[in-house]
Image: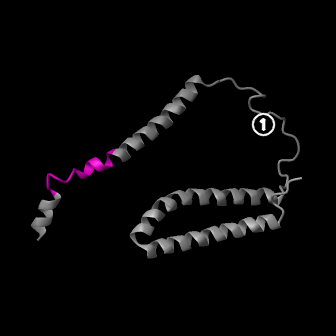
Amino acid sequence: MMDALFNLAASPLMPDPRISWLPVGLLLLVGIGFSVGTLVASSLIGPSRTGKVKESAYESGMMPVGNTKQRFNVRFYLVAIMFVAFDVEIVLLYPWATSFAGAMNADPATGNYMLASASVFFVLVLVGYVYDIGRDVLKFD
């Protein structure tokens, strides 16, 4: 029994398992090469002069004034959380949509489960959106 499994694994029809790691290695090589190349190009091409103006804080072309420990309105954070919620929703919607059609055709019970779980997810996001509207987050004066 064990010999049959070993012979199956060493079959000439099966590719060498090290070849399946080739895309991963290539991706690592490209990522490291891009990072190192960007750092080297920045140090060679970029400006090297320093001074009082270059070392000062830059705030969208305006001189920074006032206290840096100023409190922000809570609306800013609620809008940021709302953005993250919708962003995550969109990111999760693409793979769900691609697998939903196949699941519905293969097994309707699995498709119905996927539809129910996505509906719960959308309802939770909708509850957060209604909460933000109730708190007047989207009304900027």
8 lies left or right of 43: left
Residue at x 83%, y 51% (from the top left corner) = 69
State yes or no: residue 19 in magenta. yes
Image mark count: 1
Residue 78 picture quarter:
bottom right
Crowdedness of circle 1 by 10 Å Cα count: few (<14), some, many (20+)? few
Q: Using the image as rendered, state which of residue 96 and residue 56 is in the foreground.
A: 96
- Is residue 26 positioned above or below 83 on the image? above
Spot occupied by residue 82 in the image (x, y as percentages of width and height): 71, 60
Residue at x 50%, y 37% (from the top left corner) = 35
Residue 103 picture quarter:
bottom left
- The residue range painted magenta reads 10-22
23 lies left or right of 48: left
Spot occupied by residue 75 in the image (x, y as percentages of width and height): 81, 59
Spot occupied by residue 130 in the image (x, y as percentages of width and height): 76, 67
The residue under label 1 is 60
Q: Quadrant of the N terminus?
A: bottom left
Q: In the image as oriented, which residue stretches furthest toward the front?
A: 105
Residue at x 25%, y 52% (from the top left corner) = 17
- Is residue 31 positioned above or below 73 on the image? above
Q: In the image as oriented, which residue stretches furthest toward the bottom?
A: 109
Residue at x 40%, y 39% (from the top left corner) = 29
How are the residues colored? Answer: one colour
Question: Considering the numbered disc 1 on the image, is that residue within a helix, a strand or a loop?
Answer: loop
Spot occupied by residue 131 in the image (x, y as percentages of width and height): 77, 68
Q: Look at label 1 and name its amino acid.
A: Ser
State yes or no: residue 108 in magenta. no
